[in-house]
Image: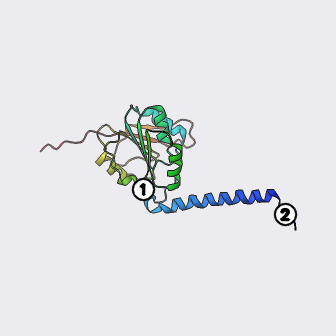
Amino acid sequence: MSSIPFGIWLFIGITGALFAAKAIYGFSIALVLPATRGALYVSTARRRVKAFLDAVDLQPGQRLVDLGCGDGRVLRAACRRCPVRAEGYELNPLAFLKARLLCLGRSRVRVRLKNFWNVDLSSADVVFCYLFPDVMNRLARKIQRELKPGAMVVSCNFPLPGLAPAHILRPGNSLTNDPIYVYRMPAKATDPG
């Protein structure tokens, strides 16, 4: 009776682990599909995060909110740059766990497994998002309803309908040169009557 060589066992083990990881990833996407409408967790490129942080003058103590924070990259980068209070919302359980692990020990970063549609954004100073275009109309209404005058919104790739961007960034040396829209919320209109 011959034994199976170690190399075969190693191959089977690695293949099995990769299959299990892919299955867990697929399950985590399927679990939140009704809420995310198929949006996948994709990390924002570091060059894009840097461009956004260069354009937004974060001040100590401000509240930064990342809608669909993925692995928390934006939150961590913002806190490295300035002592802000950073809060991220993520529905994908796998991305949430990754963000929680990567943000361990960072007292100014909070990552929540929660749908951002159910969160009041009125105390946010800066809102960051990298979302699909099919939710941008609804997000624009939420932002206009909830954000205070002077608050900033940064949207990667897709504009917020009905709002005029203060700046449109195009980070150099990126593969796609996709835009980053930066908005500043105007003062609320006062009722003349």
Residue positioned 52% across, 59% down in the render? 29
Q: Amino acid at mark 1?
A: Asp
**Of residues 150 and 93, the one drawn nearer to the viewer in this rendering:** 93
Q: Secondary structure at mark 1?
A: helix
Which residue is the site of mark 2? 3
Residue 7 place in picture, x, y as percent: 80, 56
Report the side of 53 relative to 162 (left or right). right
Determine if residue 137 is in view. Answer: no
Q: Residue at x 44, y 63 (%)?
A: 34
Residue type, label 2:
Ser
Sequence order check: which comes first, mark 2 or mark 1? 2
The crowd level at tag 1 (other Cα within 10 Å; few <14, some 14-19, many 20+) is few
As drawn, which residue projects farthest toward the left? 193
Q: Is residue 145 visible?
A: yes
Residue 186 found in image quarter:
top left
User: Which percent across, then down, holds residue 55?
Assistant: 43, 33
**Residue position for label 1:** 134
Q: Position of residue 148 (x, y in %)?
A: 29, 41
Measured Cα–Cα span from mark 2 to mark 1: 56 Å
